[in-house]
Amino acid sequence: MTEMNPNLVVIVSPNAALKGPTKAREIIMEKGIPILSISDQPSKKAFYAKNEEGKSVPSVPDSTGFIVLPMDPMIGARKEFLDPTEMALFNAELIKLLSCTGVLRFIQLEIEKLIDGVKSGKLPDLPKITLKPEQALEAAGFENPYAYSKAFASLKMAEIVADITTTACFKEQNPDKYIPMVSAAHEVLRAATSLADEAREIEKGNNTVLRTSHSSSGKIQRKKKLLDKPQ
Amino acid sequence: MTEMNPNLVVIVSPNAALKGPTKAREIIMEKGIPILSISDQPSKKAFYAKNEEGKSVPSVPDSTGFIVLPMDPMIGARKEFLDPTEMALFNAELIKLLSCTGVLRFIQLEIEKLIDGVKSGKLPDLPKITLKPEQALEAAGFENPYAYSKAFASLKMAEIVADITTTACFKEQNPDKYIPMVSAAHEVLRAATSLADEAREIEKGNNTVLRTSHSSSGKIQRKKKLLDKPQ
Amino acid sequence: MTEMNPNLVVIVSPNAALKGPTKAREIIMEKGIPILSISDQPSKKAFYAKNEEGKSVPSVPDSTGFIVLPMDPMIGARKEFLDPTEMALFNAELIKLLSCTGVLRFIQLEIEKLIDGVKSGKLPDLPKITLKPEQALEAAGFENPYAYSKAFASLKMAEIVADITTTACFKEQNPDKYIPMVSAAHEVLRAATSLADEAREIEKGNNTVLRTSHSSSGKIQRKKKLLDKPQ
Amino acid sequence: MTEMNPNLVVIVSPNAALKGPTKAREIIMEKGIPILSISDQPSKKAFYAKNEEGKSVPSVPDSTGFIVLPMDPMIGARKEFLDPTEMALFNAELIKLLSCTGVLRFIQLEIEKLIDGVKSGKLPDLPKITLKPEQALEAAGFENPYAYSKAFASLKMAEIVADITTTACFKEQNPDKYIPMVSAAHEVLRAATSLADEAREIEKGNNTVLRTSHSSSGKIQRKKKLLDKPQ
Amino acid sequence: MTEMNPNLVVIVSPNAALKGPTKAREIIMEKGIPILSISDQPSKKAFYAKNEEGKSVPSVPDSTGFIVLPMDPMIGARKEFLDPTEMALFNAELIKLLSCTGVLRFIQLEIEKLIDGVKSGKLPDLPKITLKPEQALEAAGFENPYAYSKAFASLKMAEIVADITTTACFKEQNPDKYIPMVSAAHEVLRAATSLADEAREIEKGNNTVLRTSHSSSGKIQRKKKLLDKPQ
Amino acid sequence: MTEMNPNLVVIVSPNAALKGPTKAREIIMEKGIPILSISDQPSKKAFYAKNEEGKSVPSVPDSTGFIVLPMDPMIGARKEFLDPTEMALFNAELIKLLSCTGVLRFIQLEIEKLIDGVKSGKLPDLPKITLKPEQALEAAGFENPYAYSKAFASLKMAEIVADITTTACFKEQNPDKYIPMVSAAHEVLRAATSLADEAREIEKGNNTVLRTSHSSSGKIQRKKKLLDKPQ
């Protein structure tokens, strides 16, 4: 891939602190190619270090950016519970949640900025952030404050899915204990997605759903009323 | 109250580590009366201390028991958001959640054991525990494992309500930021309660709801089928 | 309690016409202390008498007020059906219903008026009313007329819960008959609460939920938009 | 119609005590033709009289039977609220409720008995009853007791729709008052129907829905499992 | 009926291309009485013919109009599945769907135009149309575009019910295959009706439900706000 | 890719009849590598031809297999409506639907058979089919016949999404007409997915959800009870 000599590489993976993604970043960095990593909560280990006051701060080369998504939890990876059908269901719920709550649009907008930079010859500073609910929700563009609250709640619920699956997959060895746990984690996600959907339905009921499609020139356009033209 | 010279005092309060409940326990202990404290997560400070290996362990006199309920979260106590109606709603949701998930029955059964002990002249060891979801769910008596998982999920969701309200009430000073937070916390609780209700409805659909009413002699009786006699 | 010589006593009980609450009122009245009784439908026997035209009218001393709540029904008190968990569930549903439909705020506002009177040295006339749905709903402050209608419906549904539980508890002796009845009564309440919740969700969707929190001086403040300051 | 000299006439109408249906019954009775009236709660005036002890008892000629359906309420007949669309909606909800709760099957079975009698040359005693929830629910054939309870609740809710519409249509003259009332009455019905549907869904979930179709010979056949043959 | 010499006859039937309805139209036409047929998709065979370019076009005498409703599907008429209760349920769902989506009001308005014409002495051209979703939805008068979309979706779902029941009733002979099919068809309808109801609830939440009741003079009046007078 | 000289190539694309996928198949076939194409309804043009009786039959070389999925509809690809968020939502709903209804497991099992063949040195006949609902549902493994019916209904609803989006994207040029259409198509999908989820919830309520995970040796194992071991 590095032979294509790209202006920017975006790496999306679970736990960017693992050997694989770490090696990938090293190779690309050696070639002097800017990287944006998009990953989940455990990857913070790769991107943060303690400063002198003992506070955890971003610690990556300038040419490496990252977006850590604490609301992108690990699946309940226990073979007694999972099968391809359950896995696809988990991912479907999660994609819906990340869409309704603005996480996906946040990423769209960040990548857009980078592409615009590449086009204009000057890549902007790469984002180095752990995504907060408020940032995702701003991208979502909710107008009704209760829709906003419901989506906020949905994001916090997504965060704890990982707490439960981590315990179930790495700490608990008794199937009679970890099976109900992974099952519970997926129920939390299902409820969280349902709440995110509820938030979007409120906006639909008020005809205020934000859409950010691309014009034929590639520019992002915005609209809120369903029958309006994007502008 | 101590003048009534009771065999046992049960104290229910938020944050048992605060001055008021702490003073209450001191006065009662001085009289040599056993105490059972029922309280929420922050009260762990009152009941636990680090042992030599640095591990947090129960640290109370023999005559003091406690049941810490991490699933009993603080309300979103910000005056821009709360009013008596909203407060009653929060508590109604929470009572429903604690009922459906077995927390309430766990307490019923624990107190029952103590009362039986008092009656028979020998108070048993007082419980010194932080309630785990699994313990509550065992008391709930679910037969369907997905009902169990949903109730488990509900309890984990209740736990994070406190994380959000604590931030909103004690760390964030800007109303534009903390109002959506407290509102989101209440939405998490509403979703959690709805999930607990879903669990109970599954058991109703299978006619397996556990009931533990009292016989006229005061003994707890059990039944599962709606039309059965409790026994 | 009368030794504290209060300016006003508020008595909340089921069936205020029973011996206990009646005796309590007599004792307090003898001391010349004003009373406000808050109770349910059967307590009308205590507060109303037929006038010359045979019409039922309030019939209490000036120093006794009452708020009769026909929407506060008796629980399905049959031991084959009830247990502490079921009882807590019933009460949770009912508190939610009374909150969403304005009953709770109506009481808040009435008591507030009395407290203001006590503070200013002149207790106003005590309320002598059987609460109508319309009065509760006005306190609820609904803006959307269908939310209002749904809450109205919810209150009427709450009223019939008592009809069913009364028959099941006092008239029907066959468990095979009264168990389904009490179970049905609780289902009516559950459906009624769900409808009240639906009404509140409509108002949330329009950002018009009324909140009446207290200022630090104790005055009631109002607001409708979630992010507004109460005033 | 009487010229066709039928063996039995079934008259279905609202309020069978009104002039029209009363006249119809008179004409048919004069011809000596047996009648079964199916009507709603207000029609009790036509079919019941007080006996010597002052108790209301059926009081009709032998050749007249009746089935009074207290769960078949009057519509909210106020022109500010109704239009053909709203009326069709009300009736659709009601038909669904009466179907799910067994009322419709009760009538099917009663008429079936009469037709069988006519065929065999001897009309059985005509029913003279006010339908109780328990009778309808027995016809519905619920196996799950909570489904039974939900359907029971649904029937009781249907009964109060009429209380509200009667007040709104005949007692209250102020549109600002009666419009919300009729709207609330229809919300009660909508909630009642939803509960009846919930009951049926439980039975579907257990594969125990009773079906009573006709064989080609006209005999009623029964089945419960979806893939079974009716027998 | 023709002896009453009416100005217009409206015939409502399934499949107007069958012998019965066809014969009925012939008899009435012979008397020179205008006819409006309202029927379902299969009746297109009766009203359309191919023109010279091979395109299907209306082909009926001037005195015959028709409204074909593709969203009025055949029931799942297999005796293993149907019984009077299931049939009433199917029809209840369908009436609700046709009401919420404007189909019923479209017919109301068309018939109204004809009645007005008859009254004024000149019957207007009879409608000769296959109803499109857009025409029904215009009559429904939705203001929120997502409510409109949901109702649109509901109408398209109603159309496929017939595809499934037709296969199940006429092509498939194995009960193990056609029973799940007819059951599935009814589930499509139930989901479609639920979506239509969702559309109406959005309009209720915005207080924009169109009502078209009749004035005492018989004229259609319109209103949108619940508490408004029709005009 | 062909340089890797694989035993089998699986190509997943929309409309396999388009130039791109067709070219891909040609290149791979030239190398003598077997192909399995997985695609949607319009791709039938690539895989079927009319036989002598004018019937459409599979018409591909032996080394080419295909699975056509009529329940995998085109998105509502109109820029006024779509944006990356809406697109992700559409796909999330669809993945959930295809998972719950067994489509995904059908593909899993088919591919598994091919891999087993490759491993054992003899590739079996490649599937040449247009997936029927019954085939998907058999893979889903529903035990409750109403869950089966609901999933069946969901699949039929998914099929018509494509009808609507095709019209909206290729036939209708007026945005005021095609925007509501694409929006309606997505509402059909959302309702279809919700129905598929309902089906799965019924199976969860009966503890009969089929899971087909892989053993460590790669073999597919089955289980139905949540706490069972896969076997």
Image (spheres, coloured by chain):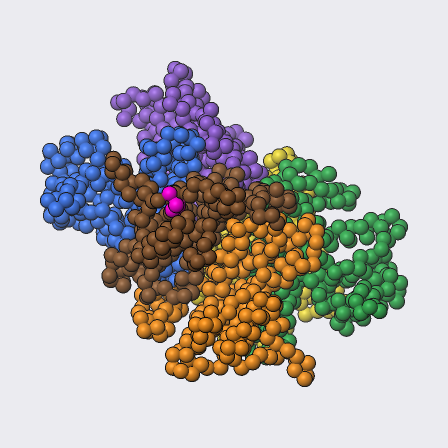
Chain colours: A orange, B green, C yellow, D purple, E blue, F brown
Q: Which of F186 and A6 is in front in this view?
A: A6
Point 57% across, 48% down: residue: F218
Q: Quadrant of residue A108?
A: bottom left
Q: Is residue D212 visible?
A: yes
Q: Position of residue C216 (x, y in %)?
A: 61, 78
Point 74% across, 60% down: residue: B130
Q: Position of residue B159 (x, y in %)?
A: 65, 63
Q: Which of C40 and E108 is in front in this view?
A: E108
Q: Can residue C94 be seen in this view?
A: no
Q: Position of residue A88 (x, y in %)?
A: 51, 54
- Assign the magenta stretch its main secondary structure: strand
Residue E74 horizontal side relative to residue D185, left or right: left
Q: Quadrant of residue E188?
A: top left
Point 49% across, 82% down: residue: A125
Q: Position of residue C170 (x, y in %)?
A: 63, 40
Residue C41 horizontal side relative to residue B140, left or right: left
Q: Is residue A192 above or below residue D196?
A: below
Q: Give the range drawn in magenta.
A: F62-66
Residue E23 forms part of the magenta stretch? no
Q: Which of D148 and C72 is in front in this view?
A: D148
Residue E62 horizontal side relative to residue B154, left or right: left
